[in-house]
Amino acid sequence: MKLMPFASTLAILLLAACSQAPSNDDATTQCSAATADNMAMSATEHAQMADREKPASPERAKNASAAGTVESVDIAAGKITIAHGPVEALHWPAMTMGFTASPELIAPVEVGQKVQFDFEARGMTARITRIAPAQ
């Protein structure tokens, strides 16, 4: 029975302590912690934010040259797939990728043929502007 007055007093003290406004130091610590938690972003969220901040203007075309082996040709669709070496001008590694081209430009090209070519790149989209058998 002696615990009842003690428990009541403890409850009153706890309620009083909780109702007090925090000191400036406490508020700063709480805000800093909340800000750090809110600012934690995944790599995906960073990439999405970067995409939103990019200007709506089209990316400027960059001209480059490469050598490679023709993997496929679709003259009607104006598409050619080439396994090419590194393209240092664009910092691209060796890869196999599809390019667009005019049907007249790729008509003489054959699958398996080694070629040298020039192209315009906008990001990872590229259009062949010149193609010739490799020397």
Image (cartoon, grey):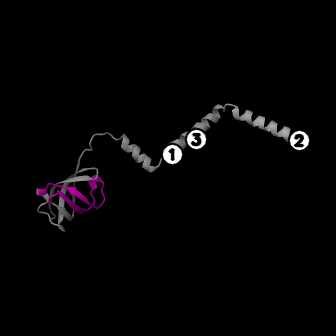
Could you tell which of marks 3 and 1 lies nearer the N-terminus?
3
Discs 3, 2 touching: Cβ within 8 Å: no
Badge 3 local density, few (<14 within 10 Å), some, or many (20+)?
A: few
- Residue lying at 30% horizontally and 40% vertically, measured from the top left: 56
The range drawn in magenta is 75-103
Residue bearing mark 3: 33
Q: What is the three-letter code of the residue carrying label 1?
A: Ala
Residue 63: horizontal and vertical position, in percent?
21, 50
Label 1 to label 2: alpha-carbon separation: 50 Å
Residue 122: horizontal and vertical position, in percent?
26, 49
Residue pushed farthest bottom? 112
Q: What is the three-letter code of the residue carrying label 3?
A: Ala
Would residue 31 be found to the left or right of residue 47 on screen? right
Whether residue 82 appears in magenta in the rendering, the answer is yes
The front one of 92 and 101 is 101
Checking the image for residue 2, the label placed there is: 2
- Quadrant holding the N terminus: top right
- In front: label 3 or label 2: 2
Discs 1, 2 touching: Cβ within 8 Å: no
Would residue 86 be found to the left or right of residue 37 on screen? left
Could you tell which of marks 1 and 2 lies nearer the N-terminus?
2
- Residue lying at 70% horizontally and 35% vertically, measured from the top left: 18
Checking the image for residue 40, the label placed there is: 1
Would residue 21 be found to the left or right of residue 117 on screen? right
Q: What is the three-letter code of the residue carrying label 2?
A: Lys
- In front: label 1 or label 2: 2
- Quadrant holding the C terminus: bottom left
